[in-house]
Image (spheres, rainbow, N blue to C red):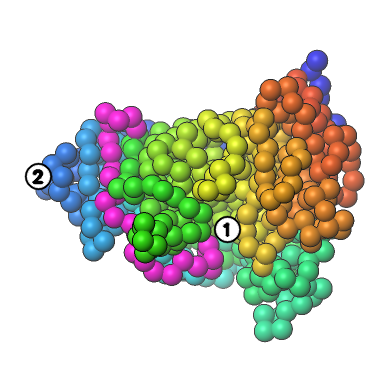
Amino acid sequence: MEWTPVVWKEYLKNGPVGRNLPDFSHAGYCMGDQPIPDMKTPVFDVTESRFGAIPDDGLEDTAAIQTAVEAAGAAGGGVVYLPKGRYDIHKTPDSPFLQITYNHVILRGQGSDESGTILFMGAPGRAERVRRLGSVPAEKEARHYTAVAVMGKEAIRELAVFTQSVVRGQMDVTVSDTSTLLKGQTVVMECIDPLIDPKNPFPEKTDIPAQLTFPFKLVQAQTDSYGDTSRKHSWIAGIEKILDRQTIRLTRPMRFDQFIRYTPRIYSFNGLTGVGIEHLRIESAWPGNYRHHKPFEGADGSIMRTATEQDYLWGGIWISSAVNGWVRDVVFKNMTQGIILTHSAQWTIQDIGFYGHDGHAGVTIGWGNDNLVERVDFHARMVHPVTVKMMAAGNVFTDCKTHYEGRNTVTATDTAIDFHGIFPYENLFEKMNGFYICPGGDVSVLPHAGVRNVFWNIQAPSRIEGYGAYGGDSFVQTYDYGSTSSKTPATMYEHFPQAFYIGITRKGNRMVSIGDSKDNRSNEWMTVEGLNCPGIAIPSLYEAQRKRNQTTHSR
């Protein structure tokens, strides 16, 4: 029998205020208001003599493809076209990597199947230091040495400061001066925690982390969550209009209360826009035998591949400091890392497939907001198929599917919705087939998640095995339940404060619980509706919110 969630009715009445459902309607390329463009000209065919790439000849093609990318960039944008065949890139450890550093450059193949366009990465990324995602400029992070890297400029310039506090759900902001701001402008917003002392931090001495994890109580071991890593929070926003000399209207509602004591500021955004990667296949020479955070050892115990290489250096696509872009119709085969998106917003990642050897992570978003990930199929087993971390917010994962079940105790691969610490908040996971929440992150960055993440119309796998000795059927788990109020698996959900679990079912007509209960309930920790009840009348919260906004704006 069909049923309508109460939380949806409350959202229709009052919007994304207080502890109501967040607004996800602006996720994706150009906030979902424009289709992804199909640019026809100019075309820069990498096989032309002026570029010189020759598919299927077994020779390095990186420089030829990069020359075509540079030519498209110099022309103000264009299609870098790769006809069918295999192109060898980064063939040796010393050969170059592909980078897109220009607006409106489209890297387009001729199909993502085995007879289409293949970018074949012959060697891993450089064995440099892997740091906490987004903590250093992109070019200093080893994970950017991928098959394709989209790298925008990170320099920012202060434009205005808030002169009044704003609350969650508010779109109008009073600022010092709007003369430096423009209608339609993309900007960076930043808040700084006034209580965190980077040199002498204490878990009780926080403001922004306390708000974004309430009612979770930070503990001593969670050093990064109340330390310098969490002192600043920045995100990308858009200006819908200039109302007067001191007031702007944003393109979407605020996601948390921003008090004047946070010294909220508006900065310029100088990264990339309009970059696309489409219709191709990314493969690598990585031979497999994955172990999570462990090296691959030979028969004599010698290290053949380091843990860093195994986890991070066979990467597909890196995206940093970029907005309004897309990755579509792309297959990854034998890659340990698929797509990483950081300090970026309003990307659409759609129609993606993972095949081949077991690996580390599929689609990862950290320090990113309002991105749309849809129709991703996981045939290859991953430790973290989909991940949000590092204050990621407003991201939508919809219509994704795992084609395997169960936890592999050797590789640690699983069907996980992964929250990896530094409180990612107000993200939506919906219409997910075969997933449950099995998060990661070291203790210093916990709790796994921030406030008001939404899990909507998800079918959990029949095999829910989770961590350690816990053998229950809870949809949400953590290895660190010792930091929760009961210090038992019964309160694992406390690592996901104020979460919404709406319409969660399980394959095989099996029952699923939240913690140790199968009851619907609403309290300071969570809202649970329709647990083990199929037939939700709103199958996609994202689409329902978009439809509501379109109806409202048309009046």
Residue 119 falls inside the magenta stretch: yes
Q: Residue furthest left?
A: 49
Badge count: 2
Q: Residue at (51%, 44%) from the top-left corner?
A: 382
Q: Amino acid at mark 1?
A: Trp
Is residue 496 rendered to the left or right of residue 418? Answer: right
| Residue to which mark 2 is pinned | 49
- Decide: few, some or many residues near mark 2? Use Cα within 10 Å; few <14, some 14-19, many ≥20: few
User: Which numbered circle lies on residue 367?
Assistant: 1
* Residue 17 x %, y %: 81, 47
Is residue 146 rendered to the left or right of residue 209? Answer: left
Q: Residue at (15%, 45%) from the top-left corner?
A: 58
Q: Amino acid at mark 2?
A: Ser
Quarter of the image with the C terminus in it: top right
Residues drawn in magenta = 112-135
* Residue 124 x %, y %: 33, 57
Q: Residue at (87%, 56%) from the top-left corner?
A: 486
Q: Residue at (55%, 51%) from the top-left corner?
A: 365
